[in-house]
Amino acid sequence: MPVNDTQVSFDDELLVVVDEKNRVLGYKNKLECHKGDGILHRAFSVFIFNDRGEVLIQKRSGQKHLWPHFWSNSCCSHPRKGEELENAVQRRLAEELGISTPLTHLFTFQYHAKFGNVGSEREICAVYIGKSSDRIVVNPNEIAEWRWIKINDLTRELAKDPDQYTPWIKLEWERMMLEHRGEIEHIILP
């Protein structure tokens, strides 16, 4: 299986620091944003579905500082200084999964999750969904494993074994299933 092994994520890349109302306050490097209790910054999460009613999930690379080897959504990251959110989302889909597809924004929310003494995610996160039947070409610097899973099976796995998953996928998936099931079904129907 072909892979894209270019390093695409760096501790010194500048992220967009925001206030509680998502107004830009400035820019800090990724490492600073995730130290200790974290600094509030912009982020995004993407869920890619296929024609079979499955969603793509990934196990994060062991190179990740926060939640290495935890299962998570299809793709997630941050816009960089000077980068529009939609451009950042498409950039990361290409860098992590080797795909490009139109996306639908579902919601934006704020959360804070601490990973032991290592650091924290403190994000205002935009959540997107899309559909693709393109061949997945993973970047091993970002992804250790990946798989397609039926929607109801993911819901069951998150309930049965939540400690295997990142905090944000649990928050996002619950809201998606409660408030956005119709939009998801519209995306996956042929």
Image (spheres, rainbow, N blue to C red):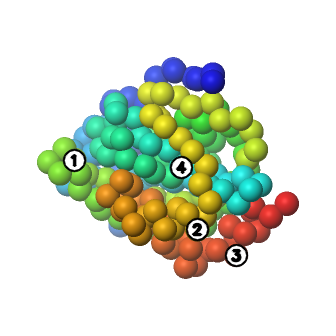
Callout 1, which amino acid? Gly
* Among the 4 quarters of the image, the one containing residue 30: top left
Q: Nearer the viewer, residue 76 or 109?
A: 76
Badge 1: how crowded within 10 Å, few (<14), some, or many (20+)? many
Q: Residue at x 55, y 79 (%)?
A: 178
Secondary structure beneath dot 1 equals strand
Mark 2 or mark 4: name the one nearer the start of the chain: 4
Q: Is residue 186 left or right of residue 144?
A: right
Q: Residue at x 43, y 64 (%)?
A: 158
Frontmost of labels 4 and 1 is: 4
Badge 2: how crowded within 10 Å, few (<14), some, or many (20+)? few
Q: Position of residue 125 (x, y in %)?
A: 46, 59
* Residue named by callout 1: 119
Callout 4, which amino acid? Ile
Cα–Cα gap, marks 4 and 1: 23 Å
Secondary structure beneath dot 4 equals strand
Cα–Cα gap, marks 3 and 2: 14 Å
* Residue named by callout 3: 182
Secondary structure beneath dot 2 equals helix
Frontmost of labels 3 and 2 is: 2
* Residue named by callout 2: 152
Can residue 108 be seen in this snapshot? no
Q: Residue at x 59, y 54 (%)?
A: 149
Q: Position of residue 27 (x, y in %)?
A: 36, 43
Cα–Cα gap, marks 3 and 4: 20 Å
Frontmost of labels 3 and 4 is: 4
Secondary structure beneath dot 3 equals helix
